[in-house]
Amino acid sequence: MSKNNIVVPEAKDALERFKMEAANEVGVSLKQGYNGDLTSKQAGSIGGQMVKKMIESYENGLK
């Protein structure tokens, strides 16, 4: 059972677009659905890019 439950189900599509955008920015090709063939490095770079963008967004909101 996955513990990656989305708190706001209406945000699911936006989160998927955000993930695809981050993957594109770091040069990782994602397909719709399952991406279990990614290396740990690729998955980590996508997650890292997402976190970086979230922090930047938060910091910009503080200005």
Image: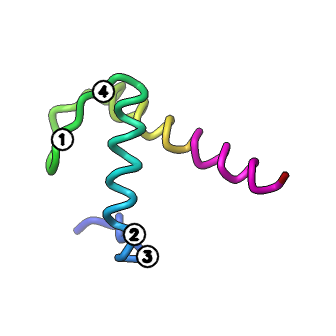
Secondary structure of the residue carrying tag 1 is loop
Which residue lies under the disc numbered 1?
A: 35
- Amino acid type indicated by mark 3: Val
Q: Mark 4 to mark 3: distance in Å?
A: 27 Å
Residue at image coords 17%, 40%: 31
Crowd tier of the residue under label 1, counting other residues whose Cα lies within 10 Å: few below 14, some 14–19, many 20 or above: few
Q: Mark 4 to mark 2: distance in Å?
A: 23 Å
In percent of width and height, residue 56 lies at: 67, 43
Crowd tier of the residue under label 2, counting other residues whose Cα lies within 10 Å: few below 14, some 14–19, many 20 or above: few
Could you tell me if the residues under marks 3 and 2 are in contact, i.e. CB atoms within 8 Å?
A: yes
- Amino acid type indicated by mark 2: Ala
Q: Earlier in the sequence, mark 4 or mark 3?
A: 3
Task: In the rendered structure, find residue 28 and report the number of the disc placed on it.
Answer: 4
Residue 25: quarter of image = top left
Secondary structure of the residue carrying tag 4 is loop
Q: Report the mark closest to the observer, 4 or 3.
A: 4
Which residue lies under the disc numbered 2?
A: 11
Residue at image coords 41%, 49%: 18
Crowd tier of the residue under label 3, counting other residues whose Cα lies within 10 Å: few below 14, some 14–19, many 20 or above: few
In percent of width and height, residue 33 lies at: 15, 51
Q: Mark 1 to mark 2: distance in Å?
A: 20 Å
Could you tell me if the residues under marks 4 and 2 are in contact, i.e. CB atoms within 8 Å?
A: no
In percent of width and height, residue 6 lies at: 38, 71
Q: Earlier in the sequence, mark 1 or mark 4?
A: 4
Is 25 placed left or right of 57 in the picture? Answer: left
Could you tell me if the residues under marks 1 and 2 are in contact, i.e. CB atoms within 8 Å?
A: no
